[in-house]
Amino acid sequence: MFNPVTFADAAVGERTVHLRLIETTDLHLHLLPFDYFTDQPVTGLGLLAAAELIEEARSEAASALLFDNGDFLQGTAMGDYLAHERGLRAGDEHPVMTAMNALRYDAITLGNHEFNYGLDFLTAALAGAACPVVSANLMTKRGAAPRTDRTLVKPYVLLDRVLTDAAGLRHPIRIGVIGFAPPQVVDWDRQHLENRLQARDIVETARAWVPEMREAGADLVVALAHTGIGAAQHSDGMENAAVPLARVAGIDALLTGHNHMVFPSPVFTGHGGVDVQTGTIAGKPAVMGGFWGSHIGLIDMLLVRDGGRWQVLGTHTQTRAVAAGARQGEARGPAPDRKAARARLQGKARLAHLSAAIAPMHEDTRAAIRRPVGETAIPLHSYFAHLGETAALALVAEAQRQHVAARLRDPGLAALPILSSVAPFKCGGLGGSGNFTDVPAEPIALRHIADLYSFPNSIAALRVTGAEAVEWLERSASAFNRLRPDSQDTLLRDPRVPGYNFEVIDGLSVEYDLSQPARYTPDGRLAQADARRVARVGFRGAPLDPAQEFILCTNSFRACGAGQFPATVPERLVLQDGTITRDVIRAHVERIGTVRPSTSRSIAFTPLPGVHALFETGPGAERYLGQIARFHPEPRGLSRAGFLRLRLDWSAP
Ligand code: MN
Ligand code: MG
């Protein structure tokens, strides 16, 4: 029945019908374009920013359906404020439902993050949904087979719609919509879901339900698959199952997500079963519309009704970026035709109405983020991170360690010691002399947590050996220039290595010998196989055993290979639950109230008598010079770029 020719090639006749599927995915409660960590508006994301694109996309097709693919409830301070502080009272409507209802979604599915606040909160939020909510592989009671499960929400829904063909004739169609989530949710949110929710394999579930949908008269089946585009081969319980799911007979189109990527895009070139040219997976049209409302995804289907049966003549898949849409909108001037102009105006009016409806919750959230979540007993800054003053990193490291420790279920993994790696993201460089973390010893609010951790990364953990941890430190040591014997005033940092590629491993003590050449190049390639800057590494007061195994906490960006650190391969990933690291830090600070991060130095340097180096840092460092007295720092004024220059004595660092 499926004919995978491209939309453009398909013959358009009088009886053909253009049906457009519109996707949002992984919104993570980004409604207004606003960053609650920095308390500033942002551009290029948010459902309300995408609303104009949605209305425009609707106006271009004779018929359109709008779906959300999950992970809508959690991910901004508004979500936490609602769940943890304010609560949903009887009669309250969750703002994401207010927004989705206003935009007239046709159906939505659940992502893994819908469960972060527990089942009762989710149920209260979903009570406000005006459209069906579907998810086939999450159940409150597991049956002998998928079709006897008691699913949490409806496994699928049949949408009866009337489509208009090119000649203006109307045809009834029944569109089946089924939802899926990664079965890992029940582990990831075990504290909320134990004994309350179970999960099945996505593909197994699809094979069971799709035939029933067909029997029930579905002319088309659309999968709302909150799963990523991963391995081509099916394995039981796989998290990213889009490719094997696409092969399930009877599914006509797939909306994907969870990966926070864009499909079609060149990133997926060469993936088994995936065609980035035609925007298909296993020959079926598929899309992934970014995350946080960065994009909308569109699947266009050209259909014809032939002898009472619907046939797919061709498909076309695309995404549209909200950022690009805003730019085009400015350049484009008046809309090309009256219909599009009217749609745009309607979109604008709806948007204004919706912004007003969400404004009270938005303002309450802003008030909440200014309230302290805890306090720090000592100032936390990054001015001397490269010199081993790493209290600010130690706070993040400890938060990461506790999060990961609480979630490692496998007894073999839970027994391993946990190391925690953090880089000073805000540490000069191209960001300039003001680009340093600087949190005074006082109450900590959300904006301070953004200062401590400036990227919206999510947490990840790898299984590594001691030897690999040493390589990790060698890779970090490429952040330094070589200090040759008797050299004077060599610039200490190699400007080609940004702060985010200088990882400090909390839990290990390292001594760097900077008289040695770097083992790795600034971009992470092996430079000299016999070069070693790591002179000594200690773990719990003894030399590190290269064969010992560890869990190493890091972020998902690093764990996926960014910066070319060793052992950053998928096989070593033991945890990647999608939790934003800033949320991990915030939860940690809230839990302990007053933080006193370790000030013990995790980095030492081999003394190089007679050697002096120049260190550039932020002018704000001047009041903390006492912390690096061992280097006998001599201020040498400001550089042209505004950095404070310090001459450091490497005789006894
Ligand atoms: Mn997500
Ligand atoms: Mg997800």
Image: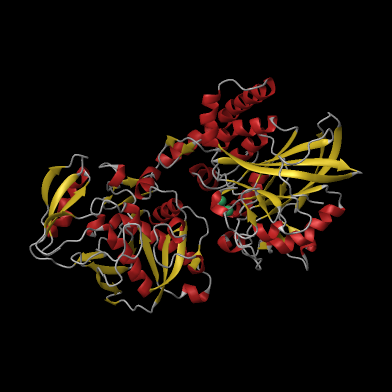
Name the residue nearer the viewer: 303 or 55.
Answer: 303
Measured along the vertical axis of the image, is residue 540 above or below residue 89?
A: below
* Left or right of 364 in this view: 189: right
User: What residue sits 80% from the left and 63% below the top?
Assistant: 148
Name the residue nearer the viewer: 321 or 620.
Answer: 321
Measured along the vertical axis of the image, is residue 317 above or below residue 138?
A: above
The x, y position of residue 1, in whole percent, is 82, 51
Residue 436 visible in this rendered orientation of the protein: no
Name the residue nearer the viewer: 171 or 314.
Answer: 314
Measured along the vertical axis of the image, is residue 533 above or below residue 261?
A: below
User: What residue sits 40% from the left and 59% below the top?
Assistant: 399
The x, y position of residue 546, in whole percent, is 35, 77
Measured along the vertical axis of the image, is residue 219 above or below residue 588?
A: above
User: What residue sits 40% from the left and 41% below the top?
Assistant: 371
Residue 171 visible in this rendered orientation of the protein: yes
The x, y position of residue 52, in whole percent, is 60, 30
Q: Quadrant of the image for the C terminus?
A: bottom left
The x, y position of residue 122, in whole percent, is 63, 49
